[in-house]
Image (cartoon, rainbow, N blue to C red):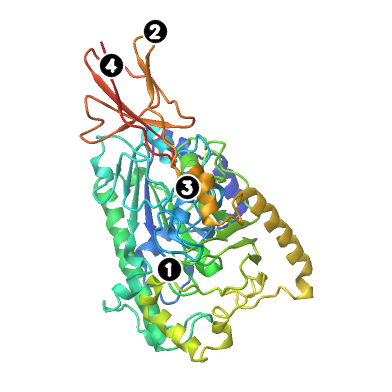
Amino acid sequence: MTGYKNRIGYLLAGVIWIFWTGTAFAQKQNKQPNILCLVTEDIGPYIGCYGDPYANTPNLDRLANEGIRYTRMYASIGVCAPARASLITGLFPTFFGANYMRTSNTKPLTEGLVPPYEAVPQAGVKCYTEYLRAAGYYCTNNAKMDYQFKVPITAWDENGKTAHWKNRPDGMPFFAIFNMEITHESQVWKRANEPLVIDPSKIVPPPYHPNDSVTRRDWAVVYSNIHAMDQLVKQYIDEVKDAGLLDNTIIIWYSDNGGPLPRQKRELYESGALVPFMIRFPDGRYARTVNDRMAMFVDIPATILSLTGIKPPAYMQGIPFLGMYNGPERDCVYGARDRLDEIVERQTCVRDKHYRFVHNYLPEKPGYMEILSRLEMPMMQHMKTLYQQHKLEPAVRRWFDYPRAVEEFYDVDKDPHEMHNLIADPGNRSHIDRLRKKLGQLDKELNPYLGLSEAELRDRLWPGGEQPITKQPEFSVLADGTVKINGVTAGSSIAYQVNGRGLHENHWLLYSKPLSLKKGDVLTAIATRIGYRPSTTIKFVKK
């Protein structure tokens, strides 16, 4: 099986895989597997099992020892909201207007003030959790859901700070996401005075950072935050173990984008886009394996559906990398960045297994962005001051300098920190030409709004500046007496309650088939579509 490096070898791994899928596992256990997703924020592979010499992560190292560790998992952008838009839909964020950070932005921008809006995918695109709910899963998210559109009522059984798989009806399989914010960029300054788990003087920063006490101190805070997150991972897993469910639960852990420090978060380079990603199967399948298959966030929804035996919908741009519908490996990954907080940017890239090619559409600007919130970080203030005083080393200063090259090309195998732009190197001409052509194809295929201002994008998504509205659903009684709820707006989803409740108070059920009601039952329904305003509720009384 492509990408596996383990003792049993490629052939045996492939043979074993042929005889296993998520469905086969569920049948063996006589029930659907639970899935626990533990999502941390803003870290690259700064984990012991990834070979980081400074990390103190015993629980994640144990998880890697019991599962699969992926080494080439990429976000399409090094920031959370566009990344989550991809993680919930299985689409590239550029493809449906979700790549600006954030669409709910209300700050003045370089292109003027653009009122808040929502990304709008094509008709029929759902939050992938709807497919899990329709298959009988109880789906919860605690608690980040900045998807670039308001969360449809049909997406989750529960969401928010109190959401938990423990609230499901007895015996119901769960899909649960817990977000761990302790490693977020903001925690570098908010937790600056917490005890450190590593001596800052022992840290050697990457070459794009100045090697001094301020930098080493912030790096030490990052590693201390990661250690605290590692303890949270144990707590979440222990909850499942204590409930007696560990032997039927798949555990998935990853970061929502790359590192939190300057020239990491918000970047398209390895430092911003490459993330750690691990999966543990309850029966020990593929324990202690390492997979170097190229994969992206857009692949994760399709893979989770595949693990549960659900065929991913045709509109998804992701390729499952596990389960019944396991697909071919990607030959490259695509990335793009647009406005990030207050600063407008326009940049795309393609990365294959060896090289990265970048196109800068605004080369007159520096790679550095004057992100106001990031200036709270001691290291960012320090780097800016050093640059203004002409005291940064040339390799570090390049991030601040402008104009930039229109094109960048890096041999990532030889230059993992992407410090040396080889775009003018004649020895790499064939690779440059190949990836330049590939990026042009991907820009056209995956980035239909490329080149538009955000105001123009918003007008495309919401014609005339008005948010489209989902029409009320309609009821019909079938010949067998069951009640069908019909969506009027193309591609809409429907949530409903019977007599004012779903599985419990304040819960809405996902409609998937005609309903059997008793005389006098009151059926309440609401229709929703991603990026649209939900319909008003409508009621039906069974006579």
Q: Which residue is mark 2?
A: 479
**Residue 167 visible, this angle:** yes
For label 2, the SS is loop
Q: Residues within 10 Å of mark 4 (few under 14, many from 20)?
A: some
Quadrant in which residue 180 is drawn: bottom left
Q: Residue at x 74, y 75 (%)?
A: 424
* Numbered mark located on residue 119 in the image: 3
Give the CA separation, mark 2 to mark 3: 40 Å
**Residue 120 visible, this angle:** no
Camera-side residue of 11 and 241: 241
Looking at numbered disc 2 in the image, what kind of residue is underneath it? Ala
Give the CA separation, mark 3 to mark 4: 37 Å
Q: Give yes or no for contact between labels 3 and 1 (Cβ–Cβ under 8 Å).
A: no
Looking at numbered disc 4 in the image, what kind of residue is underneath it? Leu
Mark nearer the N terminus (2 vs 3): 3
* Numbered mark located on residue 517 in the image: 4
